[in-house]
């Protein structure tokens, strides 16, 4: 009895073993069969697949070696798991397409691109056979391209250059993308503005251009309500203010722009008994050469220009007006806040309270604030490694302006007076320009040095001339460069005079 | 987060270094990642003479003084070495070389002497095993590739090239040579000089601790030049005066100073990440090159090398390298110093009859490199030095570009640069090129 059972076990064991072997053999056969060109061709009936392959370098070449469909269109078999899953995927995908789609409606052309080929050509397949990227006969272009591929395989691929090697359709020869750098174009005239709309100003004689956004005038509540977190007393009382329409620069004046001014107007240096600036003289004499690196070594280009004095910023505006024939100036504090709010009335022009972003609450102290939103709009202490950033890295506010609240703080036209909101006449205040006289000017908007509470739209700050020239060793100290202030720049606005614009256009 | 990653990378680098030190003398360690340091223990065998073996027939391309010298160095490397062909752009140079060789009892068949811009192609058709490339470096990339395609072993002089396009071409051809099992030695003879090699071994095994900085200098009086003679076309004049034209020579920061730069790259174990520097032209009489350069090469993590090169008479002229570490410093050539300046280790040179150090290595490094070349071929242990020499040459080009432009130039800039110097076609006659001396930066307003 026991023996019988034993024998039965043996039998089961043997039969089981045989069937496993049979199954493996069959599945191997199946895998092999389903990897033949004939099997592929059974479904891939689109007319050109075979014909173009026959003409291609992978079939028609001097060596007599011909590739199979799966050599390119599946990963190498050695990567077993990946090979099988991709094989199954393509099997089902192609069968589904074959059964359900009309062959004529498929856009074959669209599949001949490098992008599309990534879905059905496997680079490891290329590299399985092409083990030497530097064969003896490789030409100069090939050598350059293969080195480029080795250095950065992520952004380069075999098919990027060798697109037609599997299916030849009489396409152009191998070509590496040429990156041509066109010489910088110098503008010979400023932008012509025909109506109240956005434009791109061009500084004549330079290749510098910057965007100006048309800001429709309107009424808004200037200042912050008494219950706004982190509010300072100089931000109130809240006043109804109306401003006229104007254009405002999309970004703070960049180094490219400021250097155009500096190169055009800079003077040799201090002369004995330097005369006071005479605003009526035709020529504008600009800044003296700075000591050290005014960009703090952070780079110039499209980063906002910094360390110029308020006086230098105003001289820049006068120069810009003279070379463009328009009326550029610093924004008034009211214009600045109107533009920064972009029609909103909260602490920021985006959602969120300063308390959400500051680290001083218990929750935020423990877990850190959720800064996803503020990060997209503002360059501030949390996301700038204590330096300015190129102008365009952030999202715009509702008026299309960038960096109003961050990157660098900005000079305004007005003198600073902490009580000025209360001193304006009752009712709606129209185009306020601050106090008539003063010592320091208004500075608005936060900078890369500030945390969330000081990025609030209503927050006010002011120049600190003495402090910002503390370490300037010259006597008298510079009127052009602050030695100790690297977080303030400025933004220009262009005045809008509808009547002038109309007469201009009618003249034409 | 960033800190963690950095310290992790440091750790990996360090462990790679320790691992490599463990394998000292056994295996060569190739660095794939350019950012990480590599310890180069691929020492040549340093025999006094190449072993006997198959006959090696060589052809010389570039029959000037260095070419002729290199050919004689090759012939001195062992037995059964022959020089069977000569090529140069000028006929007179070929025959001049031919007669110099005759005086040394070297007979090159006259039928195997070629001249003209395509002379090297004719030379490659001769039955040869090895080609010596000693033309001005401008022509190297093209000739090197042709030699490798013709399946020849190569000895080529430094610098490897004159521009970034050429440097990348050398690197690619170098990879071809590796895949074909050919040997390429590159005329950076300090890497074949026994005292340098022993000093390197000391430093790599920690004799001066972690490397913190370096300097390298090639300060010499003015070098040879040719003023134009009647009847010379533009092209002939420039090639006869090649050492003074940037498109042919690459400027002296490549031509000579590349030796020092190569040593610093070798000791630090990587190439610099970027360069800032300056230079100028105050005393030169011909051509378009500078007389002096001062470059700060930044290797990252606070490690910098100050590179100086100058060719002006009557100055503090000297040359060498120095590498500073946490536990001492070295002149790279033969001595390790403690931080207090006392000598920690010194290379043992052969002694003269009086038992005093001769101060020179047993075998001239100019011959040693050919012994190592012939040994590599005859023992079938191919060595290809072209890529590392191209990298040192490109380092020098990065410095030159920094000085010429006044800009900070990065390795990435070099790897992407499309700068190719020189005319499109090579033919004797007038050349439509301008030769402004490079001016960095922009002019300020008066």
Image (spheres, coloured by chain):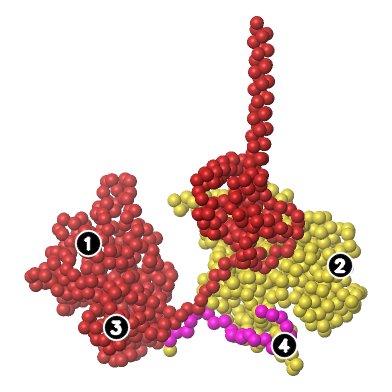
Q: Is residue B106 visible?
A: yes
**Residue beneath disc 1:** A344
**Residue beneath disc 4:** B429
| Residue drawn at 38 percent across, 81 percent down | A203
Could you tell me if the residues under marks 2 and 1 are in contact, i.e. CB atoms within 8 Å? no
Could you tell me if the residues under marks 3 and 2 are in contact, i.e. CB atoms within 8 Å? no
In this view, the residue farthest toward the bottom is: B230
| Label 2 vs 4, first from the N-terminus | 2
| Residue drawn at 61 percent across, 85 percent down | B435
The picture's colour for chain B is: yellow
* Chain painted red: A
x and y percentages locating residue B349 in the rendered image: 77, 62
Query: Badge 3: few (under 14), some or many (20 or more) residues near its Cα, within 10 Å?
Result: some
Q: Tell me the CA gap for discs 4 and 3.
A: 56 Å
Q: Label 2, secondary structure: give it.
A: loop
Q: Quadrant of residue B176?
A: bottom right
Using the rendered image, report if marks 4 and 3 lie on a common chain.
Answer: no
The residue lying toward the viewer, choosing from B358 and A266, is A266
| Residue drawn at 64 percent across, 37 percent down | A30
The residue lying toward the viewer, choosing from B271 and A84, is A84
**Residue beneath disc 2:** B127
Q: Tell me the CA gap for discs 1 and 4.
A: 73 Å
x and y percentages locating residue A226 in the rendered image: 14, 58
Report the side of A390 relative to B34 (left or right).
left
């Amino acid at each position: 009895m026991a023996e019988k059972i034993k024998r039965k076990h043996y039998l089961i064991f043997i039969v089981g073993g045989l069937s496993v072997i049979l199954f493996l053999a069959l599945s191997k056969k199946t895998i092999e069969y389903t990897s033949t060109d004939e099997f592929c061709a059974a479904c891939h009936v689109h007319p050109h697949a075979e014909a173009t392959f026959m003409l291609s370098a992978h079939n028609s070449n001097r060596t007599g070696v011909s590739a199979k469909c799966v050599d390119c269109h599946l990963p190498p078999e050695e990567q077993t798991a990946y090979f099988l899953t991709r094989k199954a995927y393509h099997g089902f995908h192609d069968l589904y397409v074959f059964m359900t789609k009309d062959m004529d409606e498929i856009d074959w052309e669209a599949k001949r691109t490098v992008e599309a080929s990534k879905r059905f050509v496997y680079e490891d397949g290329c590299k399985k056979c092409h083990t030497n990227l530097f064969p003896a006969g490789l030409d100069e272009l090939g050598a350059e391209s293969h080195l480029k591929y080795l250095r950065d395989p992520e952004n380069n691929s075999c098919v990027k250059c060798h697109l037609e090697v599997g299916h030849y359709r009489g396409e152009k020869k191998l070509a590496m993308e040429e990156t041509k750098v066109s010489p910088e174009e110098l503008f010979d005239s400023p932008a012509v503005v025909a109506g109240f709309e956005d434009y791109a100003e061009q500084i004549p004689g330079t290749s510098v251009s910057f965007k100006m956004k048309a800001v429709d005038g309107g009424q808004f509540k200037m200042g912050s309500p008494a219950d706004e977190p982190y509010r300072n007393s100089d931000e109130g009382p809240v006043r109804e203010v109306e401003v006229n329409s104007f254009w405002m620069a999309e970004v703070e004046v960049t180094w490219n722009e400021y250097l155009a001014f500096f190169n055009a107007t800079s003077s040799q240096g201090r002369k004995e008994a330097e005369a006071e600036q005479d605003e009526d003289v035709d020529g504008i004499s600009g800044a003296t050469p700075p000591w050290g690196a005014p960009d703090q070594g952070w780079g110039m280009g499209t980063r906002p220009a910094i360390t110029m004095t308020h006086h230098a910023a105003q001289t820049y505006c006068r120069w810009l007006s003279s070379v463009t024939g328009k009326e550029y100036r610093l924004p008034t504090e009211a214009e600045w806040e109107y533009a920064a709010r972009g029609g909103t009335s909260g602490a920021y022009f985006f959602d969120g309270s300063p308390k959400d972003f500051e680290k001083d609450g218990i929750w935020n102290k423990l877990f850190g604030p959720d800064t996803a939103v503020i990060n997209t709009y503002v360059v501030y202490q949390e996301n700038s490694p204590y330096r300015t950033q190129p102008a365009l890295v952030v999202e715009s506010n509702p008026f299309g302006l960038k960096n109003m609240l961050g990157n660098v703080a900005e000079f305004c036209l007005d003198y600073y007076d902490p009580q000025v909101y209360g001193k304006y006449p009752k009712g709606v205040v129209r185009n306020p320009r601050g106090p008539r006289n003063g010592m320091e000017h208004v500075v608005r908007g936060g900078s890369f040095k500030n945390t969330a509470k000081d990025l609030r739209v209503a927050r006010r700050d002011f120049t600190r001339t003495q402090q910002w020239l503390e370490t300037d060793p010259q006597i008298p100290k510079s009127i052009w460069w602050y030695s100790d202030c690297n977080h303030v720049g400025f933004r220009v606005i262009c005045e809008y005079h509808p009547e002038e614009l109309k007469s201009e256009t009618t003249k034409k | 987060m960033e800190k963690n990653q950095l310290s992790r990378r440091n750790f990996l680098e360090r462990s790679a270094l320790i691992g490599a030190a463990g394998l000292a003398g056994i295996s060569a360690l190739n660095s794939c990642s350019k950012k990480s340091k590599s310890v180069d223990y691929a020492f040549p065998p340093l025999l006094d003479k190449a072993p006997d073996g198959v006959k090696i027939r060589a052809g010389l391309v570039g029959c000037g003084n260095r070419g002729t010298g290199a050919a004689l160095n090759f012939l001195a490397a062992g037995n059964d070495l022959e020089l069977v062909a000569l090529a140069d752009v000028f006929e007179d140079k070929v025959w001049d070389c031919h007669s110099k060789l005759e005086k040394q009892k070297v007979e090159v068949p006259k039928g195997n002497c070629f001249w003209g811009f395509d002379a090297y192609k004719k030379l490659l058709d001769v039955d040869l095993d090895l080609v010596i490339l000693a033309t001005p470096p401008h022509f190297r990339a093209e000739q090197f590739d042709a030699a490798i395609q013709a399946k020849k072993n190569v000895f080529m002089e430094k610098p490897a090239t004159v521009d970034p396009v050429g440097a990348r071409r050398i690197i690619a051809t170098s990879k071809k040579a590796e895949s074909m099992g050919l040997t390429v030695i590159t005329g950076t003879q300090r890497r074949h000089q026994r005292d340098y090699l022993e000093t390197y071994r000391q430093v790599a095994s920690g004799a001066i601790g972690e490397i913190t900085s370096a300097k390298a200098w090639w300060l010499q009086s003015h070098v040879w030049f040719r003023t134009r003679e009647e009847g010379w076309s533009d092209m002939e004049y420039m090639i006869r005066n090649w050492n003074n034209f940037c498109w042919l020579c690459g400027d002296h920061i490549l031509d000579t100073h590349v030796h020092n730069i190569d040593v610093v790259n070798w000791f630090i174990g990587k190439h610099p990440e970027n360069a800032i520097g300056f230079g100028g032209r105050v005393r030169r009489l011909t051509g378009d090159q500078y007389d002096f350069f001062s470059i700060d090469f930044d290797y990252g993590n606070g490690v910098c090398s100050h590179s100086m090169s100058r060719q002006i008479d009557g100055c503090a002229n000297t040359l060498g390298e120095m590498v500073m570490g946490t536990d001492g410093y070295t002149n790279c050539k033969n001595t390790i110093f403690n931080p207090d300046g006392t000598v920690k280790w010194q290379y043992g040179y052969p002694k003269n009859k009086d038992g005093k150090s001769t101060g020179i290595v047993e075998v001239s490094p100019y011959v040693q490199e050919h012994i190592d070349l012939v040994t590599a071929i005859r023992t079938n242990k191919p060595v290809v030095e072209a890529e590392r020499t191209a990298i040192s040459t490109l380092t020098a080009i990065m410095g030159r570009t920094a000085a010429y432009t006044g800009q900070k130039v990065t390795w990435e800039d070099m790897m992407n640069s499309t700068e190719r110097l020189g005319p499109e076609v090579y033919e004797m006659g007038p050349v439509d090129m301008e030769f402004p001396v490079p001016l960095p930066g922009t002019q300020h307003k008066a």
